[in-house]
Every structure is written in structure tokens, then in C-alpha cells.
Image (cartoon, rainbow, N blue to C red):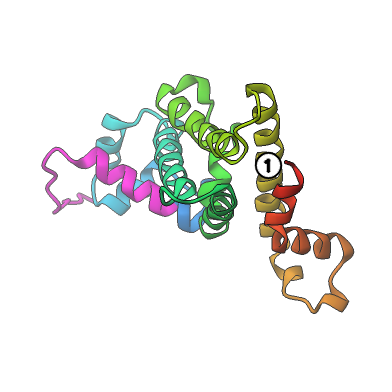
Amino acid sequence: MNITYQKYHHGNLRDEILRAAYGFVKENGYAAMSLRGIADECNVSATAIYRHYETKEHLLADVVAKGFVEFNISVEGKEEDDIFQRCENYLGFAFDNYNIYDLLFSQSVVEFLKFPQILEVADRAFESLLESVKQHDKSLNDLSASNKAIHIWSFLHGMSSISKKMDVAFNLPDSEMPIPVRSVKRARENLKQFIEDLF
């Protein structure tokens, strides 16, 4: 069967492919994505997709880079946001965009070192947190600030990863909630105190 593709692209097909792939991953996760499926979404032939992306990994690399840009914008928030608000921003992005967040930190899916476009924006994510730590406590030397930033990052990443997997349990009454889930919930509710305790 011959298929006629009606949509005409004025040199913007690569951008449209990325937009479609990002939307698909956000909604469905990265595992189910295929280049052929994205071609269908863009109303073009699979051949047209392969002119821009050699493999699924190459397309996912661009999705990761775009995801980190969106993540960084979200975490940095407003200029006046302090470290506490930026940590809330972090969790907000992770909970609202879990499938994208999952891809950003699933390095077994995309080998970051193969794709320079990822490394710069991925580094920015930690640099932003480090800058917030230094701004919060100007007495810290570089090593101490880095150590605190790593502690906070680990906590936020753990909260983001665990909480999503415990969605059902989080909706239980406190009396029925398993102790580990209750502990995670309390940690989430007392985020500011956790961070303050590190300083």
C-alpha cells in the first residue's frame, strides 16, 4: 500500500521529531518509544526520521538534553528563590514529569559520554544546586559546599525515585501506611528542616 504524507515540512522536521518524542516519553515513558512510532506521530515516513536520527538512542539523547534544560529552568525558578524553594522546585519537576525525570537519570539508556550536548546541561543541574548552597552559607569552602550539595541532591533524588513507586501507599490513612512509606512522607513534608539540619 502506498501512503501519501500530506504534511510538508519547511526544514523544521528535526524540531518536530524532538517535540513528538519528548511528548511521547513524558506521557508513556521511554521504553515504549520507537522511531517508527515517532514517524507516525509526525506524519512522515520512517526514512525521513532516519535522515535525522541514526538510532533510537540518538533521538533519546536529544530528549535527555531537552529534559535537562527544562529541569534546570524549573529548579532555578525565580531569581529570588532560595535553596529551600529550589529544592521544592526540584521535587515539583520530578513528580510532575516523572517519565522525563526517569529518563534523565537512567544512564543505562543513553551513554552520556557519547553525546556532548547532554554533558553541559546535565552538569548545570548540579552546579545550580551548588550555587544555592554557597549562597545560603557563604562561609563554606568549596569542598564543604560540594559535600552538602551532594547530600541534598541524594536526598532529593531518593525522594523523587521512592515517592513515585509508593503512590498507592501514600494515599492510605497514616494508621495503615507502612512505616518506611510514612517516614518518606514525613521527610517530604519536612524538607526545609532536613536541609537546615545539614548546615
Outermost residue, front side:
139
Up/down of 51 relative to 31, above or below: above
Quarter of the image for residue 146 reads: top right
Q: Does the magenta segment cover residue 5? A: yes
Q: Of helix, strand and loop, which one carries label 1?
A: helix
Write down the region rendered in magenta: 1-24
Up/down of 167 relative to 65, above or below: below
Measured as percent of width and height from the top left, residue 45 is found at 25, 43
Q: In the image, what residue occupies the spot 54% across and 57% down?
A: 92
Using the image as rendered, state which of residue 141 and residue 28 is in the foreground.
141
Q: In the image, what residue occupies the spot 73% across and 55% down?
A: 193
Look at the image and tell me in which quarter the C terminus lies: top right
Q: In the image, what residue occupies the spot 51% across and 29% down?
A: 123
Measured as percent of width and height from the top left, residue 187 is found at 76, 58
Measured as percent of width and height from the top left, residue 64 is found at 46, 38
Q: Is residue 32 left or right of residue 46?
A: right
Task: Find disc 1 in the rendering and name its residue.
Answer: 152
Q: In this view, does 124 lie to the left or right of 18?
A: right
Using the image as rendered, state which of residue 118 and residue 156 is in the foreground.
156
Using the image as rendered, state which of residue 29 and residue 105 is in the foreground.
105
Measured as percent of width and height from the top left, residue 28 is found at 50, 56
Q: In this view, does 72 lie to the left or right of 185?
A: left
Amino acid type for the residue under numbered disc 1 = Ile
- Marker count (numbered): 1
Q: Does the magenta segment cover residue 181? A: no
Up/down of 189 relative to 142, above or below: below
